[in-house]
Amino acid sequence: MRAVVCNEFGPIEQLTLEDRPDPAAGRGEIVVEVHAAGVNFPDGLTVRGEYQVKPPCPFTPGSEVAGIVRQLGEGVSRLAIGDRVVALCGMGGFAEQVTAQADRAMRLPDNMDFETASGFMLVYGTSLHGLQECGRLQAGETLLVLGAAGGVGLAAVEVGRAMGARVIAAASSDEKLALARTHGAELTINYATADLKTELKRIAPAGVDVVYDPVGGALTEAAVRGLAWGGRLLVVGFAAGDIPKLPLNLLLLREGEAKGVFWGTWTQRDPAAHARNVKQLFDWFSAGAVKPHVSAAYPLEKTSDALAEVMGRRAQGKVVVVPTR
Ligand SMILES: NC(=O)c1ccc[n+]([C@@H]2O[C@H](COP(=O)([O-])OP(=O)(O)OC[C@H]3O[C@@H](n4cnc5c(N)ncnc54)[C@H](OP(=O)(O)O)[C@@H]3O)[C@@H](O)[C@H]2O)c1
């Protein structure tokens, strides 16, 4: 089979496309014929050796795929050969086939195509877990989403709206904000042309109840200054590159909270709650309450271009890789 290979940590452009032996399913595993693989920011960080998880080289990046089950390992009875699934494979997704733990794979709703599915689980899963379990977002509350047209950001806009919140989207261009509006944002802030703290005071004078922050850098403190009494900051990621330091008096003054969100680890620590959230997300998808936006699909040999689009701040919604193209 063809697979994208990272032979050593470094620039994304160093990735190569190689012929590799077809994988075999071990105990508790399945082999998925990959029809699409979601491109996520952590995939790029992993290739550059900048992610908290550093796999031994060589390895194939790609952490979530959608496709068809082609092999069942010993002890797998929950799935059948031929099932359409989405699988969290951890690594190896940018390839024609990948192994995954069977309990990290879910059957797809009939009306969800592979490209949509491959970019669905990680971003919507993170956003629902972040807003629901970590942020305790309530209907009628105000939610501020930073990086609101990116992968997890746009999902947070939709999930927040589906949970009944009033959503303020903040992003770096009017085009990105227009996209966030079509996905449910009621108010918008362009933080490339306006000061986030000042704009927040103007459009949400009573403060926001929850901040969903996958960006970090200088935006985090500005957003925390706009928190309402009892407001919650959700620390999701640092796409801007800088891990912010926060003056804690900002939390004391409003009895605010800062809460980390680490979806991947949480799904393994609480699989029952994760399964409930997946069902909720699939139900919302089937009802049209969330409408995933796939903005670009690349063939396998262009995987480094797909990663560069995401890491280069150009992506809107999801970018996916399609090995069958
Ligand atoms: N905690 C978790 O469980 C979890 C799960 C998934 C992802 N994450 C993290 O969440 C973050 C976003 O992931 P994603 O897949 O949604 O990425 P993405 O689609 O690339 O979105 C990231 C957004 O960050 C903003 N940004 C600001 N400065 C940037 C820069 N220098 N380079 C790139 N983007 C920049 C961009 O929006 P603007 O241009 O509008 O500013 C961009 O849309 C990453 O740090 C990722 O590791 C965390």
Image (cartoon, rainbow, N blue to C red):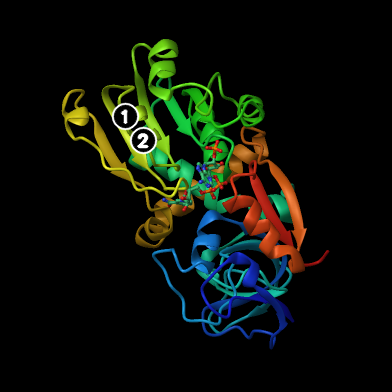
Residue 247 in the image: above or below residue 315: above
Dot 2 amino acid type: Thr
| Quadrant holding the N terminus | bottom right
Residue 271 in the image: above or below residue 129: below
Q: Secondary structure at mark 2?
A: helix
Q: Is residue 109 visible?
A: no
Q: Quadrant of residue 268?
A: bottom left
Neighbours of disc 1 within 10 Å: few (<14), some (14-19), many (20+): many
Neighbours of disc 2 within 10 Å: few (<14), some (14-19), many (20+): many
Residue at position x 63%, y 56% in the image:
308
Residue 319 in the image: above or below residue 67: above
Left or right: 209 as drawn, with respect to 146: left
Q: Could you say which disc has been placed on residue 316 in the image? A: none
Nearest the viewer among 188 and 267 is 188
Q: Quadrant of residue 190?
A: top right
Q: Secondary structure at mark 1?
A: helix
Nearest the viewer among 108 and 116 is 116
Residue at position x 41%, y 55% in the image:
272
Residue at position x 40%, y 21% in the image:
141
Tell me the distance, in whole angstroms, between the alpha carbons under discs 1 and 2. Answer: 6 Å
Q: Quadrant of residue 197?
A: top left
| Quadrant holding the C terminus | bottom right
Mark 2 vs ligand 1: CB below 8 Å: no
Dot 1 amino acid type: Val
Residue 302, percent from left and from top: 74, 64
Nearest the viewer among 170 and 119 is 170
Residue 4, percent from left and from top: 67, 74
Residue assigned mark 1? 224
Q: Is residue 78 visible?
A: yes
Question: In the rendered structure, are the residues bearing label 1 and label 2 in contact, judged by CB atoms less than 8 Å apart?
Answer: yes
Residue assigned mark 2? 220
Residue 114, percent from left and from top: 73, 56
